[in-house]
């Protein structure tokens, strides 16, 4: 019998066909390698997913940008109102009041009123062929071709700030200063025994002896003083001494008369230095109390009396400095000042008299001479200009209505504030500026300093001035033709101040930088009056945009 092989194996010779079971550690190693591979695969998938999302976003943005106009057109098509809303009467058109060359004969595709491409304001409606109403402050508007401008000789100049000076020139005569005149009067009756100054126009010094008078009345008063002195009565002595003082005798002369012990002659002395201009008495003549013996004038200061015209009166004020010329000294000037403006006007000559005072230390200016008086007044410093420029509500009012009324004009378009609706408020450099409309805001924000400079019409150096030849005076108002665009002129009503040096000071209607027609303004005004349709003929008011 053959024995079966043992399954347990032999320790000495193991069975080569025997496959033992794997150990627990090998199984764990295989599981770890599988997990790492799976995680690596998941990370790869997620990375690809993130990149695909980023690429998708970029593609979407590119498509949106590339097809933006197409999408916009589709949106407008879907949201467009019915065609009947955008319809417009055949005889109606839209125009810009500030830029009349902008004309539209239809609404926008969305049915809204078209806007001006220049100022951005909604256009106004009118009938075709109807004259466009002009903004406030503008009375006419006309446009010329370059050939017409050249043929008419039209020349424009900018309106700028200038140091205008108003000059007043008048002729007067030199006279004595009445405050420098004195009379020598006798206070007692008597006889003029001695006359030390016996010639008219003789120069005298202050306190100089002029005359001696013997007076019985004075002799009696002096004897009363001597009697009171001898009696020792102090009361009577003081009363007698006071009586002599009232008669014009100085204390020093009273003491001298008492010590002399003889008849006293009253001595008359010069009250001031000057010239004897009147001597109505002769030596030896009898005089009465209160009688004038001599007149003395001090020529160290003289007057000039001159007449100025009524229209110059506002530029003359007391204390104002003047310059004087006389024929006797042709190459010299003498300073003076205004001392008095007479309260009454001469009805025949329509002039008013003014008194000037001049220092005359060398007495070269003599009464009776003719003198030419000149005075210069900067326009912006004159009382007349300040009154015209001042706003009725006061310069320090800060409410909106006052600020708008004070500024008056839009610095961008030159239009009056309020003519295009409620003014738009802007602030720059702590200053409030008003614009005529919202369409001016972008231009203002682009260059605010230029707009502020245009509003500076009065400075410490001068005032905004327009040439005299640019002003058209109709009798009721004054016009200036401003070139708003090339060849486009608007007749602007202006308020002007005084005229000086060929220019008018501008109070209202213009801004610094405006170009006005200085040559040919009369021809422009004649064209607007003789041919009112001139503007429409060139603008093409039939509905086309030029």
Image (spheres, helix red, strand yellow):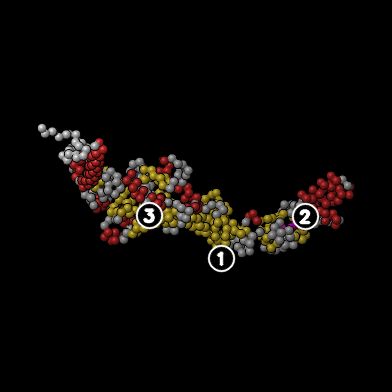
* Sequence-first tag of 1 and 3: 1
**Residue 21, position as x, y percentages in the image:** 20, 36
Which image quadrant: the N terminus? Answer: top left
Disc 2 and disc 1 in contact, CB within 8 angstroms:
no
In this picture, which residue range is highlighted in magenta?
266-270
Quick check: is 268 in the magenta stretch?
A: yes
Q: Nearer the viewer, residue 341 or 41?
A: 41
Q: Is residue 284 visible?
A: no
Residue lying farthest to the left in this orientation: 1
At 23% from the left and 43% from the top, the residue drawn is: 44
**Residue 127, position as x, y percentages in the image:** 23, 43
- The CA span between labels 2 and 3 is 83 Å
At 43% from the left and 48% from the top, the residue drawn is: 429
Q: Is residue 286 left or right of residue 130?
A: right
- Which mark is in front, 1 or 3? 3
Name the residue tied to disc 1.
332
- The CA span between labels 1 and 3 is 42 Å
Where residue 513 is drawn, which disc sits there?
A: 3
Q: Is residue 46 left or right of residue 247?
A: left
Q: Nearer the viewer, residue 399 or 505?
A: 399
Disc 1 and disc 3 in contact, CB within 8 angstroms:
no
Disc 3 secondary structure class: loop
Residue lying farthest to the right in this orientation: 231
- Which mark is in front, 2 or 1? 1
Where 21 sits versus 459, above or below? above
Our reading of the magenta stretch's main secondary structure is strand
Where residue 90 is drawn, which disc sits there?
A: none
**Residue 518, position as x, y percentages in the image:** 36, 58
* Sequence-first tag of 2 and 3: 2
């Amino acid at each position: 019998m053959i024995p079966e092989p043992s399954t347990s194996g032999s320790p000495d010779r193991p069975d080569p066909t025997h496959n033992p079971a794997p150990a627990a550690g090998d199984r764990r190693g295989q599981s770890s390698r599988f997990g790492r591979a799976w995680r690596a695969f998941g990370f790869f998938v997620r990375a690809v997913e993130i990149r695909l999302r980023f690429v998708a976003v970029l593609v979407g943005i590119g498509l949106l940008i590339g097809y933006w106009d197409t999408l916009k057109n589709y949106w407008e098509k879907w949201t467009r109102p019915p065609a009947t809303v955008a319809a417009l009467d055949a005889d109606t058109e839209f125009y810009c009041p500030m830029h009349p060359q902008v004309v539209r004969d239809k609404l926008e595709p969305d049915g809204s009123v078209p806007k001006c491409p220049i100022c951005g304001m909604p256009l106004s409606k009118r009938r075709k062929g109807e004259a466009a109403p002009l903004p406030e402050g503008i009375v006419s508007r006309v446009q010329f071709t370059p050939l017409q401008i050249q043929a008419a000789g039209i020349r424009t100049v900018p309106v700028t700030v200038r140091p205008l000076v108003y000059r007043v020139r008048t002729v007067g005569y030199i006279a004595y200063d009445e405050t420098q005149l004195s009379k020598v009067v006798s206070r007692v009756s008597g006889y003029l025994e001695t006359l030390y100054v016996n010639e008219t126009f003789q120069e005298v010094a202050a306190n100089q002896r002029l005359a001696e008078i013997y007076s019985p009345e004075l002799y009696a008063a002096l004897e009363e003083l001597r009697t009171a002195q001898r009696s020792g009565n102090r009361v009577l002595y003081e009363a007698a001494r006071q009586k002599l003082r009232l008669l014009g005798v100085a204390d020093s002369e009273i003491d001298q008369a008492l010590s002399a012990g003889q008849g006293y002659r009253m001595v008359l002395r010069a009250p001031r230095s000057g010239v004897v201009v009147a001597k109505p008495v002769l030596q030896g003549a009898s005089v009465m109390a209160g009688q004038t013996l001599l007149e003395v004038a001090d020529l160290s200061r003289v007057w000039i009396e001159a007449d100025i015209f009524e229209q110059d009166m506002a530029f003359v004020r007391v204390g104002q400095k003047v310059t004087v010329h006389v024929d006797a000294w042709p190459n010299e000037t003498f300073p003076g000042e205004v001392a008095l403006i007479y309260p009454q006007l001469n009805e025949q000559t329509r002039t008013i008299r003014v008194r000037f005072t001049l220092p005359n230390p060398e007495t070269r200016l003599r009464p009776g001479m003719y003198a030419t008086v000149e005075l210069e007044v900067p326009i912006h410093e004159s009382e007349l200009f300040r009154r015209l420029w001042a706003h009725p509500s006061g310069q320090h009012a800060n409410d909106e209505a006052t600020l708008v009324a004070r500024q008056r004009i839009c610095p961008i378009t030159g239009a009056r504030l309020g003519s295009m609706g409620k003014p738009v408020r802007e602030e720059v450099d702590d200053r409030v500026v008003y614009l005529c409309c919202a369409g001016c805001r972008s231009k203002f924000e682009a260059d605010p300093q230029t707009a502020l400079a245009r509003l500076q019409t009065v400075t410490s150096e001068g005032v905004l001035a327009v040439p005299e030849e640019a002003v058209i005076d109709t009798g009721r108002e004054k016009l200036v033709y401003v070139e708003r665009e090339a060849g486009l002129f608007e007749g602007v009503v202006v308020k002007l101040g005084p005229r000086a040096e060929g220019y008018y000071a501008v109070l209202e209607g213009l801004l610094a930088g405006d170009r006005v027609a200085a040559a040919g303004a009369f021809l422009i005004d004649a064209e607007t009056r003789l041919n009112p349709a001139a503007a429409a003929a060139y603008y093409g008011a039939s509905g086309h945009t030029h």
